Image: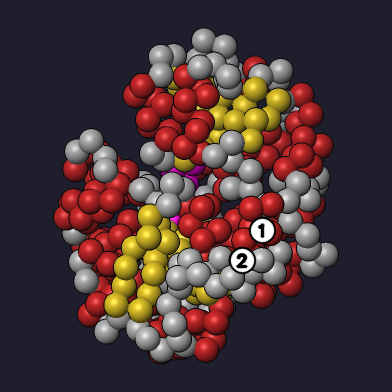
Amino acid sequence: MSWATTTWMKRSGVCAALAMLLALVPGTGSSQGSGQVTLGVAPSADMSLFIIAVKKGFLEKQGLKAQLKVFDSSPKAVEALVAQQADVTANTEPPHLAARARGARVVQVMTAYLTGQTNALVVNSGTISKPADLVGKTVAVQRGSGSNFHMAWFLERNKIPADQVKVAFMAAPDQVAAFARNDVQAFFGWEPFVTRAKDTVPNTKVWSRAADDGLEFRGNVLMREDMARNDRDTAIKVVKGLIETAEWMNANPREAAKVANEVLRAPNEEDAYKQIQIFRWPGDFRKSVKEQEIKIAEWGAGIGLFPSKDPKGLVEQLIYPDIIRAAAPSRTDM
């Protein structure tokens, strides 16, 4: 697909919250060499790796004193990392790129998950029966998120004039209520909000998941750069613990769902299991991460989501494979 600028997405502007947070005084992140690690998470299945790493003691086994800090969404956890309120988090590519482009000292050290199933387009089936019906409709999306990229991808893939779609930028947790009120007729979001809308709002249809549109996201582990570079022992232990967690999750999916649901709060363990199964937990860091991230960086810079005259250089600054090379060299080809 072309990565040209689309008119409507110029309104996305900049990630103002991240810019403000850069000015904050250091918060409650760990002190160097203390072995204390705060993992920023949200009550969503994409954070299961971190939840289980702490709850099942995989990080403690590495000699770390690990704790979870729960935020209402994964982009909020990224903001907390920028503000040094956490040490490690995970998310899809756009929020990481925006943070780094605006000066945040953060790096990606491994891949937490792969999925083409968690991001989706949700529509009101009473008003939208084909992609072209999005023209003139109000569509919600969280600014600067992976879903924001999915929306741009979907519109271009389906040859929908971008300037004929009314975009309402809002946080993912707010999209279901807006959809139920018919303030928006569709939204690009992620789980658990996609399923929540399907289960609670009449005439809801999950039109397509990212994989249906030829798109797969990588949720990469984001770490404070000063930890990665200046407290390598702790950083290596974090990565080793997360790799062991991923292996255990792949071997014990039912028990993994039970543990993760202590934070996810799905209605039952079966629902938690279904949510976790839409992700793959590779416990590695491959060249393909960089290839896709460069495309997303070109898109984000092109539409003014974040400032970068050199998207490829931005990705090179962000991706930091040194830690996984030391922790588990067979897990990376970078």
Residue carrying label 1: 20
Going by the numbered disc 2, the residue's amino acid type is Leu
Determine the residue positioned at 30% across, 80% down: 64
Dots 1 and 2: beta carbons under 8 Å? yes
Q: Give the range drawn in magenta.
A: 114-119
Mark sitting on residue 24: 2
Where's the C terminus, which quadrant? bottom right
Alpha carbon of mark 1 to alpha carbon of mark 2: how far?
7 Å
Q: Pinpoint residue 160: horizontal percent, then vertical percent.
A: 72, 27
**Height in image: 184 above or below 14?**
above
The magenta stretch spans residue 294: no
Label 2's element?
A: loop
Rendering quarter of residue 10? top right
Q: Nearer the viewer, residue 13 or 206?
A: 13
Determine the residue positioned at 46% across, 48% down: 73
**Height in image: 142 above or below 294?**
above
Rendering quarter of residue 310? bottom right
Q: Pinpoint residue 188: horizontal percent, then vertical percent.
A: 55, 34
Label 1's element?
A: helix
